[in-house]
Amino acid sequence: MSTDTPAGPARTAAATPAQARAYWTTGPGRGEIREEPLAAPGPGEVLVRTLATGVSRGTELLVHRHEVPPDIAEDMRAPHQVGDLPGPVKYGYLAVGVVERGPEDLVGSRVFCLHPHQDWFVVPAADVVPIPDEVPTQRAVLAGTVETAVNALWDGAPRIGDRIAVVGAGMVGLSVALLLARHPLARLEVIETEPARREQVRALGLTGVAPDEARGDCDLVFHTSATEGGLATAVRLLGIEGEVIELSWFGTTTPATPLGGAFHSRRLAIRASQVGRVSPARSARRSYADRLAIALDALGDKAFDALLSPPIPFDELPAVIDEIASSQRDVLCQIIDYTGSQ
């Protein structure tokens, strides 16, 4: 699919709007767009006019359904979340916009921010990251997802000649696979149950297979499907002393974990990877900003366009999230366009 040009819409010198419009999850399976006051930026802050946001399907659908476990609700706060989980809450973290007011070196720049779905917003200047000119606006929305994939690779530490599988061809799984494809691996397979998704994997130049076709004896398996069956497949594919890097968030669901059979005799391991902390393998030398900059640099690759859906207007977001949650709309990353609603 095509994306807009790297430069984005031309900037106009505008005063801070008195009101902003934002998407709120108001109850289980319910959401609406609300108006709220917008303060002018203070020293060290920026006013951002949103160009596009993306729906992070896995996490945002758990929020939409009120399936965030109460004991980790505080841990799962988004950086600019308003309200408390399960809700009402303003949640989301894939936003791209243009800085309209703020420090001179940022004004007019396209930036990425971990901000909910909202047409205008004010945040500290340190919370936005400029987008490279070669990365189109809609593709830049994926920065938060690719950042998750970067962290997972730091956790997994793939080595030359490794045999690796990625279980699940969603947003995160495909982002992990596209980054792994840059490595000198002996084998890389993406395991997916849906035939249409497997075709999409193959169109990216990757090897997409059904679970019963996947080859075992893997050194590493990255699990991203958020299904019990996917986790069982990931463990099954490991070779002796192999490791599953678990990226799925199951919410309130408790999957059965296959720790019987050969799990102990083969000395297998399952390790969590979560973007809320920089991987211990890099935390002494890389900051959150460094990690996000690496993700934005990786998005210079046009292959990531395959993860993007055709954009829908911001006003349609409440209905579209319902469609995604009920499987009426099969998308990887739903792009929300703001350019016609400001």
Image: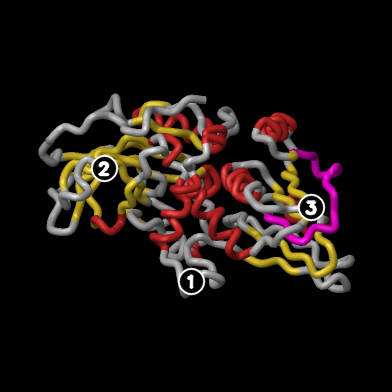
Kindly identify which numbered label has been placed on residue 224: none
At numbered mark 2, what does the secondary structure look like: helix, strand or loop?
loop
Circle 1 Cα neighbour tier, 10 Å, few/some/many (<14 / 14–19 / ≥20): few
Q: Which residue is mark 2?
A: 109
Tally of numbered tags: 3
Residue 142 at x, y = what percent? 47, 43
Q: Is residue 220 magenta?
A: yes
Q: Residue at x 70, y 50 (%)?
A: 166
Distance Cα–Cα, label 1 vs label 2 = 28 Å
- Say which amino acid is labelled 2: Ser
Percent of width and height locating residue 189: 75, 46
Please state if 35 lies on the left or on the right of 308 as rendered: left
- Mark found first going from the N terminus, 1 or 3: 3
Q: Are marks 1 and 3 in contact (CB under 8 Å)?
A: no
What's drawn in magenta, residue-wise? 208-222
* Circles 3, 2 touching at the beta carbon (< 8 Å): no
Q: Earlier in the sequence, mark 1 or mark 2?
A: 2
Asked if residue 94 lies left or right of residue 235, the reply is left
Identify the residue position indicated by label 3 in the image.
233
Q: Are marks 1 and 2 in contact (CB under 8 Å)?
A: no
Q: Secondary structure at mark 1?
A: loop
Query: In the picture provided, is 241 more to the left or to the right than 47?
Result: right
Q: Give whichever of 174, 319 is nearer the camera.
A: 174
The colour style of the image is: secondary structure
Which residue position is annotated with label 1? 283
Which residue is depicted at the point 35% across and 54% down?
Answer: 81
| Distance Cα–Cα, label 3 vs label 2 | 44 Å
Q: Is residue 203 above or below residue 48?
A: above
Placement of the C terminus among the 4 image quadrants: top left
What kind of element bears circle 3? helix
> Disc 3 residue type?
Thr
